[in-house]
Amino acid sequence: MNIVVFVKRVPDTESRIRIQRETRTVVEEGLSFIISPNDEYAVEEALRLREAKGGKVTAVSLGGEESLTTLRKCLAMGADDALLIKDDRKETYDGLRTARILAAAVKVRFADAGLLLFGRLAVGTDNAQVPAMAAEILGWPQATVVTKLQIEEGGGAAWREIEGAMEKVAFTLPAVVSAQKGLNEPRYETLKGIMAAKKKAVPAVTPAELGLAEADLAPQVEVLGLETPPAKAGGRILGGTPEEAARELVRLLRDEAKVI
């Protein structure tokens, strides 16, 4: 089975983020970048499925030339091939635009794919929209936020964590699955894999080469503002008897926090 896994280059979750308020963008100077952590689970699952059932794993990323580093990490982990969809536009936060481009890539370059794997969301945008949107555009069944996956001939089953229970869904192939933490433990790259990944050619295509018109690429989301989270205020210790503390807590929640 041929598996396509989609990955994204994102700021390191340990980095200190700075905002350029005039352009409403993240300042990339001095910022470290990594593969989105949820995408690592998708890559690992693709590799495990290939090892168990054969086939091929191709890693795909949408972005500029800097995304090649992310793709080479996937190759070093064990992916067979990689493809860069070259798009130099800055982050648009438009999940539908991204889904349209990725779905077009599947139709043009990966018509024989049996499974598309995504991370459940990309760190930075946190919208968790792209996998479901891509599945809808393609007309494929989908299972999102998956913590256990079984693939058999012609179909599969996925387990999803829901509040207070585990939900099992069945689907036919081809299908779209998004990975959640707990699905597996991603492997480290080997030295041999890293050296081989450096030599591996990574082809690039543009959205136009995938048949998309400029109208398809215009973002439909406008960023009105970008701010870092406010600093957390210090805690408050409530004194008195338990009854007095409870009354004061309710008052604070109602009058100051305004959550009740």
Image (cartoon, helix red, strand yellow):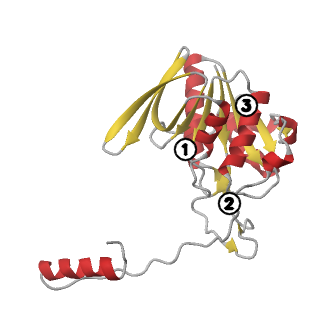
Q: Residue 205 at what x, y percent from top left?
A: 85, 38
Q: Residue 79 at what x, y percent from top left?
A: 68, 31
- Say the numbered circle drawn on residue 201: none
Q: Would you say 232 lies left or right of 245 here?
A: right
The quadrant of the rendering that contains the N terminus is top right
Task: Tell which residue pokes out farthest to the bottom in this image.
Answer: 240
Determine which residue is flagged by label 2: 32
Disc on the earlier residue, 1 or 3 = 3
Identify which residue, 49 or 169, lies in the foreground. Answer: 169
Instruction: Kindly identify the amino acid type of the residue bearing the numbered disc 3.
Output: Val
Q: Pointers 2 and 1 in contact (CB under 8 A)?
A: no
Task: From the image, state whether disc 2 or disc 1 is nearer to you.
Answer: 1
Identify which residue, 39 or 14, lies in the foreground. Answer: 39
Instruction: Kindly identify the amino acid type of the residue bearing the numbered disc 2.
Output: Ser
Determine which residue is flagged by label 1: 120
Q: Would you say 183 lies left or right of 164 here?
A: right
